[in-house]
Image (cartoon, rainbow, N blue to C red):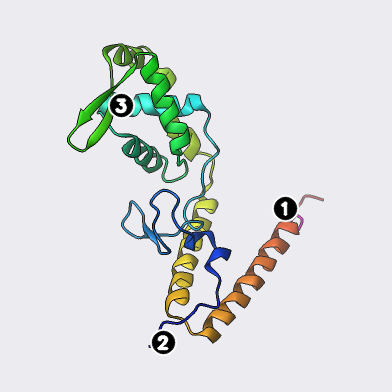
Amino acid sequence: MHSCHTSTIDPRQFGWLAMSRSGGRGPGPRRSRHGGPQFPGFGPPRGPRARRGDVRAALLVLLAEEPRNGYGLMQEIERRSDGVWRPSPGSVYPALQQLEDEGLVQVEPGESGKSYGLTAAGRAHVEARGDELAAPWDAVKGDMGEGAWELMGAMRQIGMALFQLTHSGSDAQQAEAKQVLADTRRALYRILAEDAPEEPGSD
């Protein structure tokens, strides 16, 4: 077993070892909703930055089900979009404030802190626009094909292997891993630079 020592792989090169902006935790894997480790940079990519209207629709749909706090709303949107859409506090809380100003949402104090729920006007608004609101996360999920999801799975597996190397690999093993990553990056860019293969009979 290798003893702990200074890593020759600089974790700052890989976003998945950076300190979590949301939790303030140090290096290490987060837990995904499925129970396995999730590495920043190796999980599902962030979906397109949602327009405020999309965030607004998602909040109304979720609050029509039950009161939730801001963090719970962000987590639920991420869960229902299979991790593709991860709204930030900078988009969720201003939208909640706007909905509160419009009289559609109200703050509901609870034992575990502040939560949000729909007012009577908010429920009427959702019922009147049910088809229009629908499930905004479904449109975001449809942006990625099956092949892209398979690549995301492979990236998570690579992230787990790299995490082990940074914590228990020898200097020689870490140096070799850096070379493997450099070679892989160059190979991926070569793939991107190649012309798409011609289909048979396309002369």
* Marked residue nearer the N-terminal end (1 or 2): 2
- Vertical relation: 89 (above or below) 199: above
**Residue 184: within the magenta?**
no
**Residue 198: within the magenta?**
yes
- Vertical relation: 70 (above or below) 107: below
- Residue 199's tag is 1
Q: In the figure, residue 123 lies in which quadrant? A: top left
Q: Amino acid at mark 2?
A: His
Task: Identify which residue is drawn at 43% across, 46% down.
Answer: 83
Q: Horizontally, is 181 left or right of 112 in the view?
A: right
Separation of residues labelled 3 and 2 (CA atoms): 51 Å
- Does the image show residue 134? no
Q: Secondary structure at mark 1?
A: loop
* Mark 1 crowdedness (10 Å alpha carbons): few <14, some 14-19, many ≥20: few
Separation of residues labelled 1 and 2 (CA atoms): 51 Å
- Vertical relation: 163 (above or below) 109: below
Q: Which residue is mark 3?
A: 63
Q: Amino acid at mark 3?
A: Leu
Task: Identify which residue is drawn at 32% across, 15% down.
Answer: 122
Q: Amino acid at mark 1?
A: Glu
Q: Which residue is mark 2?
A: 2
Separation of residues labelled 3 and 1 (CA atoms): 49 Å
Q: Which residues are magenta?
A: 194-200
Task: Identify which residue is drawn at 52% across, 41% down.
Answer: 47
Q: Nearer the viewer, residue 112 or 158?
A: 112
Task: Identify which residue is drawn at 31% across, 57% down.
Answer: 35
Q: Secondary structure at mark 3?
A: helix
